């Protein structure tokens, strides 16, 4: 096990900056996932840790050692790739032991390590099988065992489940969590699948355009996103956004107003552009408003499309006539639309006029220009200013 530290790591390819001034600390024994869209720099960042890519600027430390200029074999890391790349002419035992045999370990030590690794990934009794006799999940476990036998300080996993079917990916997620618990080792994991990031990680590092957007536990990224990008990327379906402007009475968007006191927002004032964000599960039918501690005023809408998902139904709401013709626009990112999540037993149909409310405690406000998060929850922005006593407020 080892602590991994990146200090101002940058990687440029001619006029393209793949990783831009990334700094982070991954603690000993932690499971951290790099997540983001394609081309965001997550794999390149991992490759700089592995030594497969030399950073243009910055330093990389594993434990107390500066490994920036060390070869991959000298860094104490082991990688598992998306492409499993087993040797088809070798059985499971030979595939797992290949690296140890290259390093001239004696036969007894190789046997001990292979059997221990096979036990960890539940491959006992399969060591004499050939790769083409294994399922996709079993082949992936062979690749993981091949990394385990090296007893690395850090495991690096670059989208290892991407080629598996959906059911097997879910199974392998639980396997990797069990593996991390049993080995108690440091794991850096790369994926574009936020479900993998949210379910397996101690913390997730959200990257975009080569820059680190937020490094925090999964639920912190979900409930307290650092900026508009994290808010829109983390969560499926995406957060609803509506651009608006602060007025003396609150935040006014094109189709609704949320009461709040701009004076309670430091460094923001009347006339400033602010973007409201609210997740689909925090949009409610007005008939259930009494169950919320702090609902907004009613917002008139018309239901458009319903998507039954089994345990919930996604309802696409049109807030204006103009929204009806925009089939290419993501409903969750248009100010003229809202996406709402309801239970399957909710009586609702397409092309129906409804009133909805937002849960004020779950509303997020962002600076429209910079994308920076301003507040998470606006229930405390409608009362007296800080320092005012209840008597004075009355």
Image: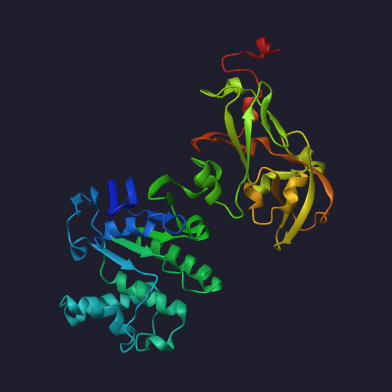
Q: Position of residue 108 (x, y in %)?
A: 20, 81
Q: Position of residue 378 (x, y in %)?
A: 62, 31
- Can residue 122 be seen in this snapshot? no
Give the quarter of the image for residue 278: top right
- The outermost residue toward the top is 392
Which of the pair 161/329 is nearer the observer?
329
Which of the pair 236/145 is nearer the observer?
236
Q: Position of residue 127 (x, y in %)?
A: 35, 85
Q: Residue at x 78, y 46 (%)?
A: 321
Q: Residue at x 60, y 13 (%)?
A: 388
In the rendered view, tell whether residue 45 sits above or below residue 136. above
Which of the pair 246/150 is nearer the observer?
246
* Quadrant including the N terminus: bottom left
Q: Position of residue 13 (x, y in %)?
A: 29, 56
Which of the pair 114/270 is nearer the observer?
270
- Can residue 254 be seen in this snapshot? yes
* Quadrant including the C terminus: top right
In the rendered view, tell whether residue 59 sits above or below residue 158. above
Give the quarter of the image for residue 77: bottom left
Query: Colour scheme of this structure image?
Result: rainbow
In the rendered view, tell whether residue 368 sits above or below residue 394. below
User: In the rendered view, does 144 fall on the left or right side of 283?
Assistant: left
Give the quarter of the image for residue 142: bottom left
User: In the rendered view, does 367 fall on the left or right side of 26?
Assistant: right
Q: How many marks?
A: 0
């Amino acid at each position: 096990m080892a602590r991994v530290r990146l200090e101002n790591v940058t990687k440029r390819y001619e006029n393209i900056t793949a990783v831009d001034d990334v700094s982070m600390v991954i603690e000993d024994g932690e499971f951290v996932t790099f997540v983001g869209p394609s081309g965001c720099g997550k794999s390149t960042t991992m490759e700089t840790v592995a030594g497969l890519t030399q950073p243009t600027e910055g330093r990389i430390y594993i434990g107390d050692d500066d490994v920036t200029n060390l070869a991959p074999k000298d860094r104490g890391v082991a990688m598992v790739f998306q492409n499993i790349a087993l040797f088809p002419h070798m059985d499971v035992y030979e595939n797992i032991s290949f690296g140890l045999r290259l390093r001239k370990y004696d036969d007894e030590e190789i046997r001990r390590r292979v059997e221990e690794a096979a036990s960890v990934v539940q491959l006992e009794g399969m060591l004499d099988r050939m790769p083409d006799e294994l399922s996709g999940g079993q082949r992936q476990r062979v690749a993981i065992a091949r990394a385990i036998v090296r007893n690395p300080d850090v495991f690096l996993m670059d989208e290892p489940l991407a080629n598996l079917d959906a059911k097997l990916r879910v199974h392998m997620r639980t396997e990797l969590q069990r593996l991390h618990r049993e080995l108690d080792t440091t794991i850096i994991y790369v994926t574009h699948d936020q479900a993998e990031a949210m379910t397996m990680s101690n913390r997730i590092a959200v990257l975009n355009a080569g820059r680190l957007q937020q490094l925090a536990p999964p639920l912190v990224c979900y409930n307290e996103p650092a900026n508009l990008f994290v808010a829109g990327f983390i969560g499926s379906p995406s957060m609803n956004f509506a651009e608006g402007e602060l007025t003396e009475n609150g935040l006014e968007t094109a189709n609704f107003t949320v009461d709040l006191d701009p004076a309670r927002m430091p460094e923001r004032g009347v006339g400033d552009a602010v973007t409201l964000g609210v997740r689909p599960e925090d949009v409610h039918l007005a008939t259930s408003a009494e169950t919320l501690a702090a609902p907004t005023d009613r917002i008139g809408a018309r239901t458009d499309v319903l998507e039954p998902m089994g345990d919930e139904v996604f309802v696409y709401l049109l807030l204006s006539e103009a929204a009806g013709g925009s089939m290419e626009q993501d409903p969750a990112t248009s100010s003229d639309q809202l996406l709402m999540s309801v239970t399957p037993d909710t009586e609702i149909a397409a092309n129906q006029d409804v009133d909805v409310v937002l849960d004020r405690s779950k509303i997020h406000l962002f600076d429209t220009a910079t994308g920076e998060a301003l507040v998470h929850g606006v229930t405390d922005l409608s009362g007296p200013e800080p320092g005012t006593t209840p008597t004075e407020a009355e």
